[in-house]
Image (cartoon, rainbow, N blue to C red):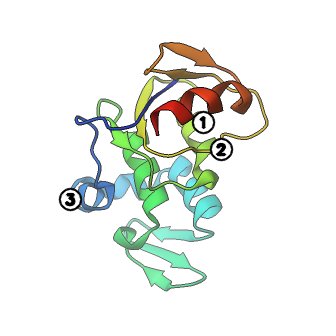
């Protein structure tokens, strides 16, 4: 399940770009799940652990992926840490839900993220409520961001 804490969370890692640059493993990049995220969010193709083909930037190193994809990989591969996912756009929301579909993940959000029209289960830590739609989530999230 995805656990979300809205607002300031001192223990959350805020600068995910710097953290990713100093923490990622080459195996993360060539992981099938990561390849799918990179293709979907960044519209790019993984050619190898150190090279991604971006339609905008050409051949790039993993450090040049979008902030959203880097943050998603941190959430995926470092389950015991809490990351601020505010650098993720709405196009990352479905991936957060997929990552947390079979495993527990806690993230910090300092903005409203649109998790879409499909039913979902998100545990809002601020209120200890589990919500299943944006209609349920929005009034709670607004109070804290």
Where residue 19 appears, as percent x and y from the top left, is 25, 55
Residue 139 pos. (x, y %): 63, 29
Which image quadrant for residue 56? bottom right
Corner quadrant of residue 75:
top left
**Dots 3, 1 in contact, CB < 8 A:** no
Q: Residues within 10 Å of mark 3 (few under 14, many from 20)?
A: few
Query: Badge 2 is on which residue?
Result: 114
- The residue drawn where x is 27% and y is 44% is 13
**Quick one: label 2 or label 1, which is nearer the N terminus?**
1
Residue at coordinates 46% horizontally, 48% vertically from top-left?
72
Image check: 22 left or right of 110? left
Mark identifier at residue 98: 1
Mark 2 closeness class: few <14, some 14–19, many ≥20 residues within 10 Å? some
Q: Name the residue under label 3.
A: 22
Q: Give whichever of discs 3 and 2 has the lower sequence position.
A: 3
Mark nearest the camera among 3 and 2 is 2
Q: Which residue is drawn at 44% across and 56% down?
A: 87
Measure how far apart labels 3 and 1 are at the Cα level.
25 Å
Q: Is disc 2 placed on a helix, strand or loop?
A: loop
Q: Which residue is drawn at 30% across and 29% down?
A: 80
Residue 57: which disc? none
Viewer-proximal residue among 131 and 38: 131
Measured in 3D between alpha carbons, the distance from the residue under mark 3 to the one under mark 2, in whole angstroms, is 29 Å
* Number of other residues with Cα within 10 Å of mark 1, as a class: few under 14, some 14 to 19, many 20 or more: some
Q: What element carries label 3?
A: helix
Q: In this view, does 38 lie above or below 123?
A: below
């Amino acid at each position: 399940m995805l656990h979300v804490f809205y607002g300031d969370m001192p223990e959350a890692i805020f600068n995910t770009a710097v953290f990713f640059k100093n923490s990622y493993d080459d195996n993360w990049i060539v992981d099938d799940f990561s390849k799918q995220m990179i293709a979907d969010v960044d519209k790019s193709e993984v050619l190898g652990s150190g090279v991604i083909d971006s339609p905008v930037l050409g051949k790039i190193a993993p450090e040049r992926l979008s902030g959203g994809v880097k943050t998603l990989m941190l959430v995926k591969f470092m389950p015991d840490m809490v990351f601020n996912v505010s650098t993720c756009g709405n196009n990352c929301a479905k991936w957060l839900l997929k990552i947390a579909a079979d495993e527990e993940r806690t993230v910090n959000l300092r903005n409203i993220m649109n998790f879409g029209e499909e039913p979902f289960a998100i545990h809002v830590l601020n209120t200890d409520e589990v919500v299943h739609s944006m209609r349920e989530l929005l009034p709670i999230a607004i109070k804290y961001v």
